[in-house]
Amino acid sequence: MQKFTLLKGLVAPMDRENVDTDAIIPKQFLKSIKKTGFGPNLFDEWRYLDKGEPGIPESQRKPNPDFVLNQPRYQGASILLARKNFGCGSSREHAPWALDQYGFRAIIAPSFADIFFNNCFKNGLLPIVLPEATVAQLFDEVAAFPGYQLTIDLERQVVVRPQGEEIPFEVQAFRKYCLLNGFDDIGLTLRQSDKIKAFEAQRLATKPWLAHSMVS
């Protein structure tokens, strides 16, 4: 998992409340057995005028010129600004995969659905909860200033506005530790690889029959 330390990036506004995971990555794209390739289908039903199906190249689709992420001023955005209850609906982990693979590293909103919030941390995305009034101010600033950027300092737990004003945010210590070091669940387990190998060696020494596989 990619480490998250300091991010300075362009902000894209998603000015809708209650954006659910089926909107983030529609159900037909969940057929894939891979963990990659979901970025082109992020917000698929809003980004395109035609219906998307797995395997259709992005170059053959008809983009919706009115959708915010298709506007030139937001190309290359790495911070998504959202309204309350972002990520509600089903618990699909494909939603943070799609956001990450599109290019977003952080999401700022007044509130998130719990399962989506947890899945973000497990996949290298930083969901930041800020007061609704503060988020509304950020929406106004993004609209007023093309190329609007924010800096997110995870170590110091602040969002820095272009003029230098710092907005503090909360993050649970263990989740912060994992993001700063790029540890997902597998990475955390592999830190104990020496202990795991020692345990397996001792187990096989005392119960050698466990090393024998069944022969059909």
Image (cartoon, rainbow, N blue to C red):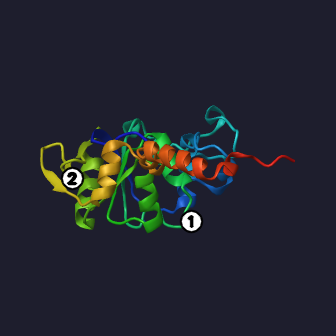
Residue 186 in percent (x, y) is at: 48, 48
According to the image, label 1 marks what residue? Answer: 90
Residue 156 in percent (x, y) is at: 18, 49
Question: In the visual, does 45 lie left or right of 118?
Answer: right
Name which residue lies at 44% across and 48% down.
184
Mark drawn on residue 157: 2
Q: Nearer the viewer, residue 31 or 18?
A: 31
Residue 8 in percent (x, y) is at: 27, 39
Helix, strand or loop at label 1? It is: loop
Marked residue nearer the N-terminal end (1 or 2): 1
Q: Nearer the viewer, residue 201 or 153?
A: 201
- Amino acid carrying label 2: it is Gln
Question: In the visual, does 183 lie left or right of 205?
Answer: left
- Amino acid carrying label 1: it is Ser
Q: Is residue 51 visible?
A: no
Name which residue lies at 56% across and 65% down.
90
The outermost residue toward the left is 164
Name which residue lies at 33% across and 55% down.
175
Helix, strand or loop at label 2? It is: loop
Residue 5 in percent (x, y) is at: 28, 42
Q: Is residue 77 above or below residue 90?
A: above
The outermost residue toward the front is 206
Q: Nearer the viewer, residue 163 or 123?
A: 123
Q: Is residue 195 visible?
A: yes
Mark 1 vs mark 2, CA separation in Å: 29 Å
Label 2 CA crowd tier, 10 Å (few <14, some 14–19, many 20+) = some
Of badges 1 and 2, the one in the foreground is 2
